[in-house]
Amino acid sequence: MNKKVKIVGSLSLITAILALGAQIYTNHKIDQILQKFPYSLRDKFQLDVVEQKKNFFSRELILTLSNAESNTSSEIIQTKLTALPFAVLADSALIPSFVKELNKNFKVTIDKNNITSKFSVIGDYFQSNIDTQFRDLTNKSQTLIIDLNFEPKSHLMELQGHLSGFNYDANSKINDLTASTTLIPIPIDDTQYDIENVSIQLKEGDIYFLNGDNTNIKLQKVDYNLDKSLSGSNYNLSAKINADGIIITDTNPKHSTIQLKNVALQLAQKDIPNQFSYAKLLHLLNDKNELNKVEIINQSLDLLFKNKESEASFNFENLTLTHKEKDKNTSFNNFSSSFKGSFADLSNVQSNYALTLKSWQNRDDNKHFQIKGIQLEGDNKNVNLAMQLELLKSNIQLFSKANSPESKQEAKQLEKDKVNFISILKNLAQDYNQSQQAIFKIDEFILGDDIMLKGIEIGASGAISEDKQDNENIELTLASYVNKKEQFQLRNGKISLPLTATNVGAIIPLNICNNIIYQAVCTKYLSVNDYTDLIIYPPIKNIAINIEQATLSGELDTYPSSLATSFEGTLSLKSGILQEQKDKRSSALLLKKWKNTNIGLSFTFDNKLFKENLLKDKNSTSWSLINDWINPEGQLNPYLKENGDNYTIEIKKEGDQTWINGEIFPTTNEENLAPEQQ
């Protein structure tokens, strides 16, 4: 018996020693965890802890949240830790002063709040649950539940939350909101956290503006996902938004509705420098003192283009626009679009885009139309976006200064900016090396009850050769065009236009200064002489266009069909580079250019439809105009030549001489023009 007592006593002593050791270890781990505070999220929010009371088995803590941007700090949670061997339990509650602050700021009433936590000091888990019951702005009871899971080994932090609903007033409300996020430690400091992903789901939302007297927005099953991954000094970002339905109703004064079904928006960017962030942009937009418009635009441009690669897509199943007062309805079905751009080298940007739309229908009191099978796709290469962005930013900077320069230093800076602006325009013109191609298709276009087009296709491509020559090719085809009212139809229409142009970059400054964004800055920086020497003179003088055998072909016929009339035409054109000109007026330059342009044009069409009097009973404006041109006053047009079963016209121009069907046409001399014509 004594032996058994001794064994039990020994085991009890060993157990007590182990429990004491475990308790000491647990307290040691708690001390280590508390020493890691404060924790920060992107240097914006900081969570700190203050230990108020401590003994061998329990501690009392106060958690404090600070906002670096607003320079504010609030005690938010008071916690009592109970240390057990290898485990810790925590009972927490919101600080009463923080509850009052929440009630005041969000105009809610928090009725009940319970926070329970537990974690293992061995490193297996840390879990916390927050259960809050409150009354919203309409005094309706709601529930907010937040779960926190922390993985000690990887230091990953997961937050999940669910809000039963929230009523802003008698009309505006949201129901069933679920959110989750994962926070990851920054590699250089595991107490600094960044967002890895965010997921938000909303079952439904109903938002009214101006107490329901104006615009109403209804949301159905909205899903938002954001993913972010760090990579050294850069990060990757992707975002997705999906919605089963979005309805926007404007009740006053238009009584119009916009309804979207199955909407999907996706954005992705790779290798964004860490110094650029959308959080900083949002902070600028929410500045309560004054919006820094220049900085906002600059930040936006940097976020859009200062990355390695960007992709975007936008799709929806149906978009309907209705107007009750005017009985007007427009609908778009099965729309999809995409864009991809490579911005690793902003002086040599590559991009491609695509768009498809199954159908577009419009109906109102006066007319209706329907378009089916719309497609657009293309790409751009070798775009010097760096200089264009520099030009845009300098333009924005200039107009941020509303007043004229008041000091010599400001006037000097303005002159420096002017020189830089002109330099960019010249560089864009000299270094132009852009190439592009695009194709646009429409399967069918029906306008009203009378007009129908089928098989529309427009293709264009262009590339700059090593000798700075722009080689362009434009193709247009039309399977058929029918106008029932005009008793007119066209089939198998085709236009082919190959052309080359030298020094095409010379027109870039003109395009820029005609752009509404730059018109004011061009007016401010460029004098009349500057505008002439840089914008007007170079393109007219230096661009030489050469068209080799452009062709036109197709068939004309009455509707219903009686006799198909084929037609075909060719065009050749060659214009040269002008010598230096003293007279730099655009009218004088264009006239000089015209004199140095050679043209060859021929057009042939079948004459049976017009000779055999098949149009006599056609009450058609279109056929009347065509017939009156071919047979004015009952006689064949003197500029047309009958050649068997065809009518033909041939025009040739070389220098000042013009021939029509081989006969010289009177020349046009500048001396014979009136001053206003010159």
Image: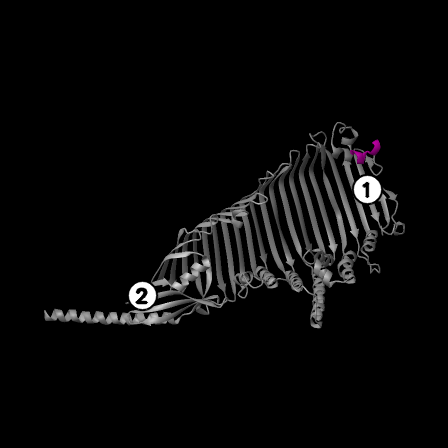
Residue at 76% in and 51% down? 546
Location of mark 2 (residue) = 88
Mark closer to the observer (1, 2): 2
User: The N terminus appears in which quarter of the rendering?
Assistant: bottom left
Please give the range of residues in magenta. Answer: 627-635
Residue furthest to the top in view is 617
Q: How many marks?
A: 2
The kind of secondary structure the magenta stretch mainly shows is: helix
| Residue identifier under label 1 | 650
* Mark 1: secondary structure: strand
Number of other residues with Cα within 10 Å of mark 1, as a class: few under 14, some 14 to 19, many 20 or more: some
Amino acid, disc 2: Val
The quarter holding residue 60 reads bottom left
Of the image marks 1 and 2, the number of the one nearer the N terminus: 2
The image shows residue 196 at horizontal and vertical percentages of: 46, 60
| 103 or 370: nearer the viewer | 103
Q: Is residue 102 found left or right of 354 in the rendered image?
A: left
Location of residue 572 in the rendering, given as x and y in whole percent from the top left corner: 77, 47
Q: Compute the Cα span from label 1 to label 2.
A: 98 Å
- Dot 2 falls on a residue whose secondary structure is strand
Q: Amino acid at mark 1?
A: Glu
Above or below residue 480? Residue 421 is below
